[in-house]
Amino acid sequence: MLFLACALSYTRAQAGVIPDAAVVVSAKTMTPEELVRGLSDRDPGRRLAYRDETLARGAAAVPALVGEMRNRYHRERILQLIESIGDAAVPPLLGLLDDPVLGSQAGTALARTAKPASQTRIPDFLRCLKVENSRNACGTALAKAAKGAQAHLPAIVKTAKDGDPVVRTFACAAMGEVGGGGAVEPLMAALSDPVAIVRAAAAASLGRMGRTALPARVALKAAAKDADPDVRHEAGEALKRVRG
């Protein structure tokens, strides 16, 4: 948030725009929906005041921001604001995933907002993997948050045994982001999964782990002869990285 404040100050200095004090006070009395609508105001001073207040509201402003994403002309700007809110935006985004109107936009924002700093949200991401219309967004968010998240590896390994192959695929991808020796054995086991997309994801994850995955070299050699071309390709690429 300090970086954001500095960036806003720099922008104002460059543009010579300073919000009127009365507008700043008025913005504090507005609803999140009113503030977000005000982001399109023609007056640059009011726009800055509304943007600052929107960011100050944090998670409380997220549903209104997501609603504005339906306007494709504002989508990129709105996404940047949600990203600036950061990890605090994750819970309201998760809560909107099942919304018949805003679910798709919330998923887009969630996939983009999640960062390695979102590790505390990993249990939430794992749960929403099982909701069919949310799994792509949650799978992407999970992979971003899982980087180096050793404490969450047991839960991810458990999810990799789910009855749904799509869930298993995302869990295998997340294990590759967690990394470390503890991920090697469950990924080796996933190379024998009955579904090709899961096997391919496991091979790709082992490849991302480089020499840490050296114990999986024999299993990867076998996977390089898999009947599925995608599995063969991922296993072949993984072997290059593991040996390297």
Image: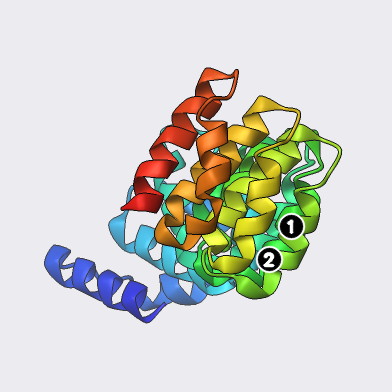
- Give, as a three-letter code, the residue at label 1: Val
Relative to the observer, which residue lies in front, 228 or 146?
A: 228
Residue drawn at 75 percent across, 54 percent down: 126
Crowding at dot 2, Cα within 10 Å, few <14 / some 14-19 / many 20+, comes out as many
Where residue 225 appears, as percent x and y from the top left, is 53, 25
Farthest-out residue, front: 218
| Quarter where residue 133 is shown | top right
| Quarter where residue 176 is shown | bottom right
Q: Is residue 202 above or below residue 156?
A: above
Looking at the rendering, in which quadrant would you find the N terminus? Answer: bottom left
Identify the residue position indicated by label 2 in the image: 153
| SS of the residue under disc 2 | helix
In this picture, residue 203 sits left or right of residue 47? right
Q: Is residue 233 above or below residue 235?
A: above
Identify the residue position indicated by label 1 in the image: 157
Count of numbered tags: 2
- Tag shown at residue 15: none
- Give, as a three-letter code, the residue at label 2: Leu
Relative to the observer, which residue lies in front, 116 or 15?
A: 116
Farthest-out residue, right: 163
Residue drawn at 35 percent across, 72 percent down: 4
Where residue 204 appears, as percent x and y from the top left, is 50, 41
How is the model colour-coded?
rainbow
Residue drawn at 55 percent across, 51 percent down: 216
Q: CA distance from mark 1 to mark 2?
A: 6 Å
| SS of the residue under disc 1 | helix
Residue drawn at 40 percent across, 67 percent down: 49
Residue 31, can we see it? no
Relative to the observer, which residue lies in front, 182 or 111?
A: 182
